[in-house]
Image: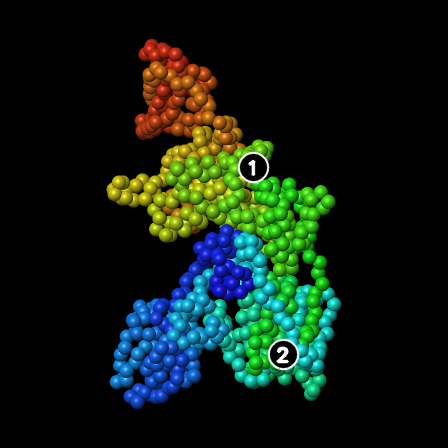
Amino acid sequence: MIISRNWLNEWLDISNVTSETLLKTLNSIGLEVDSFKEIRVPKNIVVGYVKSKIKHENAEKLSVCQVDVGGETLQIVCGAKNVEAGQFVPVALSGAVMPSGLEIKRTKLRGVESNGMICSSVELGLVKTNDGIMPLDESVGELKLGKEICEYPLLNDDIIEIELTPNRGDCLSVYGVARDLSAALDLPLKDAARYEEGENLLGIGRILAIHAEENLQSSFQYRAFEIKEYFDENLLMKIRLALIESDKQNRIERLLDYATHSTGVLFSAYDYAKLKKDDERAIFDLQKGANLATEILAGGELLGVGGVYQTDAARLDENSKLIIVEASYTDPQVIATTVYEDKQMPRQSQAYRSLRGSEPNVGFGADFLFKQLVALKSVALYAGSQQSVMTREPKVVSFTMSEMQKMIGQEVAQNDVVRILKKLGFSLTFNAEKEGANVKVPLFRHDIVNAQDVCEEIVRMVGIDNIVSKPLNFSEANRINDTFTDYKNALNLRKKAAAAGFFESVHYVFDDANELSALGFAPCKAEIANPINSELNTLRPTLANHLLKSAERNVKNQRKSVKIFEFGSVFSEDGEQSERFGFVASGLTREPSLLNSAKPADIDFLGFATAVRNAIGEFELKACDEVKYLSEFEQAKIYQNGVCVGYIGRVDVRVEAARDLPRTYLCEIEFEKLKFDGAVVKPYSKFPAISRDLSLIVPKSMKFEAIKECINALKIDCLKEFAPVDVYSDEKLGDDVSLSVKFNFQDIQKTLEDEEVAAIMDKILDALKQNLNIGLR
């Protein structure tokens, strides 16, 4: 939204308000200033009068003009096509420095002396109004020969562009912005749109009648005027129309653009000659169309849809003489529904304003327009109007002053609340105790629906910077619940997984039913009625398929080491939802680099399990062969605190081959079964630890789990940990292997003696011999 200081001043006296204050105020009330530009015409550029014009004797496109600049007459060579004798023009005298940096000097052009320059609007630093020089007229002030252009306030302006939010359609006009500023600056609005009809004018009833259906969601007012002879826009209007980038070619439609930008009221214009039949009056039929939009018809022919578009049926052209002007307003909700439901409906520039909310007081806009027309001698106005105004009770918002003070955070005087709301167009009544208030919301503020919205209007005008800051008071009950706890636990797991070297991936909760069937999963009974595509046609029962596909894509993109995890939802065969953590590692332990001589090892079961342990914490493994898409020789169930929480293992070589994967390991954890106990502080021993190794002859078929259970059953307090460290096989050992186990002992109260450790080792050997029939190598 583009405004200017002088344009604002027509609605609000801001002569004593500095531009700095104006910009600060606009920003503080939510009308964010997007750009600001000062236009100042340089000195030594004066009003001149072209006394004569002749062709240049040596240049076909140049003219030699005699220009009166007040104290003298200068000869100036000019190349503009539109320069003519009898014009008042801006003349840059010798020594003037133009905004472009050009210095004007006396010179000769094709042998003819030139003593200055007749200027265009662009050369003066203004917007472009035409393709030649800028003729002056008294719309910018009384023209006095020799008076400097910089002394004309209307040609030396401040241009402000405002960035509006979509709900502030009421500020899509200079008047709307002025209305907000009047409340913020506590200044009265001017009554700039008042129009007094003259006497002895022909009535509009002679040429126009309207028939309107009941309960229309639009308001219309029709007026008329006749063009007696050609007229042109004055200079001030040309500058402002160029400023708002009006692209209309017809001068009447350009005048309507000016009135709309000034008042916010939407206008359309019709050629009466294209509407009448024989010598009868033109009759407009206003009737409800689709989605309650109002259709305008004449003689059964559609002229347009109110607030959306106008057809070419009666559009103006250069020969139009008798003009019917339509000022209209349509409920923005109706416009929104109409343009959304009918994508093929034409949309013209007026739809932008009506969708956000145009000015509903159509008579106000029509008065402003006719005030501009009454100054034109070449126009004859018709008296009266034909109108159809929708009847709608304004919304009423109720609140108490104590509620309002609580929302604002501090006390605002009741008189200030009344003053602000009334200046913004609201009407306000209090009950007998003056505590409760009822606010009637004006039609142009369709975005105000509750007391909070009214409070925002008050805070805007008081100024958010003027609201005293207060510390935040946490007075709510504790909101930490199971959902929040699960979220925090999942977040911590994700962070740990990333720290363990895995990258997070996110997939849809949908999957490919055929690929899942190949992995051995039954289809989910909860079917998807409208799948995204054939590859996402069922709810996923596992994270495995998506993780394997992600690993495959990374491998095909030349990644040598792939480590990925995902936290997400899965669904059982009956459609029950649960949360899972999944891990996959494929290829090498790390990417080849100088540090590992470009020869890192392949990922293995122990390395993958260690990385998973770093993410989810300590766990135990028990061999299994239940997961069909894992190798029957390298898979295990994962246990924490005696509860099975998931599985881990190498992907079956057939699945690896089908997906072009190198050696790949997969793990999936049931999130709900994980235990997230707090850290337990235990005392540590200040005495040294002692380690011992045993090399046992063990049958190849025996699992280490049996040895572990046998030793744990002894409940040796000072035995901190033990684990296998080496397995050796030889032909001489036959069906047995040599298993080396490392034991660590430490007492909390004393240093262990060698004799004590030896006795414990003998106790362990005796138990192994008696229970498992295994002994030393």
At numbered mark 1, what does the secondary structure look like: helix, strand or loop? helix
Residue 703 in the image, given as x and y percentages of width and height: 43, 28
Who's the residue at 61% across and 81% down the image? 380
Give the residue pinned by disc 1. 483
Amino acid type at mark 2: Leu
Residue 608 position (above or below residue 64) = above
Confirm whether residue 751 shows in the render: yes
Who's the residue at 51% across and 40% down the image? 469
Q: Earlier in the sequence, mark 1 or mark 2?
A: 2
Give the residue pinned by disc 2. 381
The number of discs equals 2
**Disc 1 or disc 2, which is closer to the eye?**
2
Q: Quadrant of residue 275?
A: bottom right
**Quadrant of image for the C terminus:** top left
Q: Quadrant of residue 104?
A: bottom left
Tell me if 272 is positioned left or right of 131 in this view: right
Residue 501 in the image, given as x and y percentages of width and height: 38, 39
At numbered mark 2, what does the secondary structure look like: helix, strand or loop? strand
Tell me if 101 is positioned left or right of 624 in this view: left
Q: Quadrant of residue 479?
A: top right
Residue 444 in the image, given as x and y percentages of width and height: 62, 60
Residue 420 position (above or below residue 95) = above
The circle on residue 693 is none
